[in-house]
Amino acid sequence: MSAKFQSPKGVHDVLPDDHLFFSYIKKIVRHRCRQSGFRRITTPLFENVDVFTRSLGESTDIVEKEMFLMESKSGKKLALKPEGTAGVVRAYLQHGMAQLPQPVELYYIEPHFRYNRPQKGRYRQFHQFGFEVIGEADPAIDAQVIFLAHQINADLGIADKLSLQLNTIGSLESRQKYKEDLVSFYTGKERSLCEDCKKRLHKNPLRLLDCKEEDCQILASMAPKFDSVMDDASKEHYALVKEYLDELGVPYTENPTLVRGLDYYSHTVFEFWSQSEGAQNATGGGGRYDGLVEEMGGQPTPAIGYAAGIERLIDYIKEAGIRPPNKDRVQVFVAQLGLPAKKKALPLLNALREKGINTVGAVGKDSLKAQVGLADKMNARYALIMGQIEVKENTMILRDMERGSQETISFDDAVDRMVELFGDNTIDENKLWEE
C-alpha cells in the first residue's frame, strides 16, 4: 500500500544513512576552506529575481527554464536561488565587503533549486558547496581555487574517478568577436541543430559548443577555435594558470569546447568530469567572473569561484565503496527491569551522555530479553544490564555485544569503565568552537 503523502517530484528526503555522507563532505569542505583562509557565508534561499536575471543572463537555461519563481504580496518577483555565486556577490556589495582587505574569500554549503528533469544526481532541490575569491585577478588565484577543489576530491577518495577539464573563454572583447565568428559559421546550418541550439544561436552562441546532442557535437568540432581571436593578455593569463597547475601537480585536460552555461564567466573555466560518463555527470565546476561585480552595480572587481553538487559526490563516494565514519553508532545500551532499576538507569544514561558516549536506554520496555534484542538490532557495542538482583547488590552486567561475553561490575564504576573503553568525549567550550 503506497503512502498517502509523498515528496514532490524531483525532491528527496535526506535519510539518516545519507546524512553520514553529507556530514563527511561538509567536514572535509570546512577543514580545507578554513586552511585556505575562507570564511563561511549563508545567503537567503530566495532573492529578488533581478539578482539572477542580471547576473546569469536572460538567455541562459537557468533563467529561461529552470528558476522557481514566486511573487510577494506586494507584487515583488522573487526566485528560489538556482546557484550560489550571484547571491554571494549581492551580499559582497550590500555589506560593503569591498572595504575589507582584498581578496575576500567566502565559502558556503547550502540547498539550491532548479526546475529540471529529475535524473541520476540531478534534483529540483539539491545541495552544493562552493567558494568564491573576490578582489584579485592574479592567475595564481585561479590555480589555487582549482587546487582546493582537487584537494577536496582527493580527501573524499574520488579524485582518480574524475578528470579536470580546463579552458579559457578570454576577455569580454575577444569573446564578443568569437561569438560573431560562431554566428557566421552556424548561419545556414540551422537544420542540423537541435531545437535548443537553434534558440541559442542568436541568444547565447557559446552554448552551441557544449551541447550534448550528437549532430551539434559534430558541428562544434568543425567550428572556429577561440584561440584565433583571443588577445595576448588572455593567452598569457591562461598559460600562467596551466604553469601553476603543473607546479601544484594537478593533472588536467584542455577542452576548447568547455564554456560553462552562465553569462558571467570570463577567462578561466573548468569542470570535474566523470572519467566514465564525461560531462553527462560532472560533479562541479567554476571559473573566473571578472565582470559580474560591476554588472551588479559595483566597481570593476575580478573574481573566481567553484561549486560542486553534494548529491553527485555522494554517488561517486558510494560507488568507490567508501563508508564515512559513523559517529551516530550506539556505543552503550542500558537495559533495566523494574521501577528501582529504572530510577537508577535514568541518571546513569545522562552521566554517560555527558561524557560524550552515545547511550540509549529502552526505559519503556518490560522484558530484559526484548531490551537486549533491541540493543543487538541497534548494533550497540556494549549493553549495561540491571535487574532486581543487580539493584540490591549495586552492580550491573556489562555485556560485550560483539564477542558475546559478559562480566559483573559495580554500578558506581560503570561510567568510569565506559570512559576507559571509549574515552572521555565531554563537550567543552573549545570543542564547540571546532565545529
Image: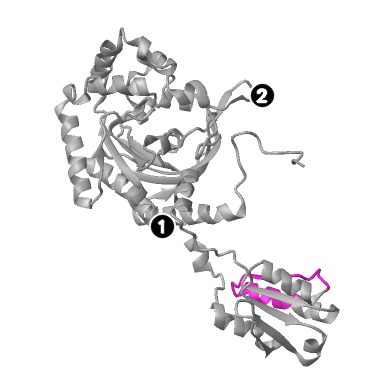
Question: In which quadrant is the N terminus drawn?
Answer: top right
The magenta stretch spans residue 414:
no
Q: Tag 2: Cα neighbours inside 10 Å, few (<14), some, or many (≥20)?
A: few
* Left or right, residue 336 beside residue 232: right
Is 400 situated above or below 307? below
Q: Is residue 42 visible?
A: no
Query: Residue 137 occupies which quadrant of the picture?
Result: top left
Residue 188: horizontal and vertical position, in percent?
31, 7
* Residue 73, disc: 2
| Alpha-carbon span between mark 2 and mark 1 | 42 Å
Residue 4: horizontal and vertical position, in percent?
77, 39
Which residue is rendered at x = 55% and y = 77% of the image? 422
Element assignment for label 1: helix
Residue 97: horizontal and vertical position, in percent?
39, 40
Q: Amino acid at mark 2?
A: Lys
The tag earlier along the polypeptide, 2 or 1, is 1
* Left or right, residue 215 beside residue 371: left
Q: Is residue 108 visible?
A: yes
Query: Residue 348 occupies which quadrant of the picture?
Result: bottom right
Q: Tag 1: Cα neighbours inside 10 Å, few (<14), some, or many (≥20)?
A: some
Element assignment for label 2: loop
Q: Amino acid at mark 1?
A: His
Please identify the residue farthest to the right as the structure is shown.
339
Which residue is rendered at x = 33% and y = 32% of the image? 289
Please identify the residue farthest to the bottom as the structure is shown.
393
Per the image, the residue denoted by label 1 is: 31
Residue 276: horizontal and vertical position, in percent?
37, 42
Q: Nearer the viewer, residue 341 or 81?
A: 341
2 or 1: mark nearer the eye? 1
* Left or right, residue 365 beside residue 418: right
Which region shows up in magenta? 346-366
Q: Are marks 2 and 1 in contact (CB under 8 Å)?
A: no
